[in-house]
Amino acid sequence: MDDLLSEKEQIEEMRAWWSENGRYVIAGVVLAAGLLVGISQYRSSKLEAQIVASALYESLAEHVADGDLDDAEAVADDLATNYANTTYVAQSKLAMARLYMDKNRDQDAADVLNEMLVLSRDDELKNIGRVRLARILLYQDRAQAVVDLLSNQNIPAFASIYDEILGDAYTLLGRVEDAGDAYRSALAGTSQTATVSRGLIQMKLVDLPEVLATPAEPAQSDDAAEPISASAAEALVEEVEEAGEAE
């Protein structure tokens, strides 16, 4: 009998607890279900965006290969505006930089690469963009801008190619010793990603001008001859002329 009463009491307690807390349990279940649905939809939307962006990038690559600047710019703008969170935006800027250079629009190429360096979160793509931008700056004879861009970039995989470009920039600036140090550093590097031509770097190193010390001013003797007077000069000229006539 006592056991029966105990079970009834437990049931009553459960009913009382549910009556008081049931709505919170139901709300929690609904919230969790909604959260799962939201996450699923977000992932689905993100995947869809990546797929569309991939298709757009493929069309951009075709326009770049064909040299269709207007169509390429339209696709690149679409990617930047509507798919900014995808990896294809940075890749599209690299492609546009190449097309701009093909069209002799080097400043547009530099501008789009600068945009990529600011926006991209992909370190490897940023290093590739930095290399291409540095070469454009060299093409524009902006050697100091190259030094500012590449100095203090501690990227082992790109160290050799960075050092080679820095050597080129220092050479344009007339900083021969710095150029030599940069070229030697490029030759000593063990880059595994960005390769360099060791033979070409050695040629650049050999072609560097010698650093010559500034010659000292010749010392003037304390007993240097004083300038002769006008009359003495005339007399000397007459003696030379008379000697010539006598011969």
Image (cartoon, rainbow, N blue to C red):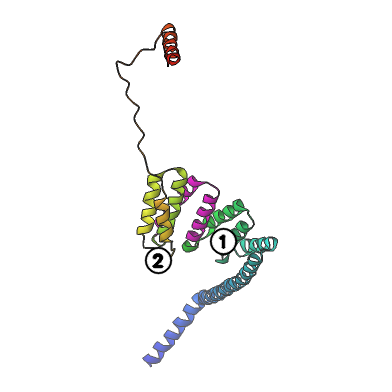
Which residue is the site of mark 1?
94
Whether residue 56 is situated above or below residue 5 in the rendered picture: above
Q: Please state if 213 lies on the left or on the right of 103 as rendered.
A: left
Vertical order, 215 against 67 (above or below):
above
**Residue 137 within the segment the image draws in magenta:** yes
- Residue at 48% over, 49% down: 146
Q: In this picture, is 13 found above or below 60?
A: below
Q: Which quarter of the figure is the C terminus placed in? A: top left
For the record, the magenta segment spans: 126-155
* Amino acid at circle 2: Gln
| Relative height, residue 139 to residue 192 (above, below) | above
Q: Quadrant of the N terminus?
A: bottom left
**Gap in angstroms between the C-alphas marked 1 and 2:** 22 Å
For residue 218, say whether it is visible. yes
- For badge 1, the amino acid type reads Leu
**Crowd band around label 2 with a 10 angstrom C-alpha radius: few (<14), some (14–19), many (20+):** few
**Residue 230 percent across, percent down from the top left:** 44, 8
What residue is rendered at 55% in x and 62% in y? 90
Question: Quadrant of the rendered structure where residue 202 is?
Answer: bottom left
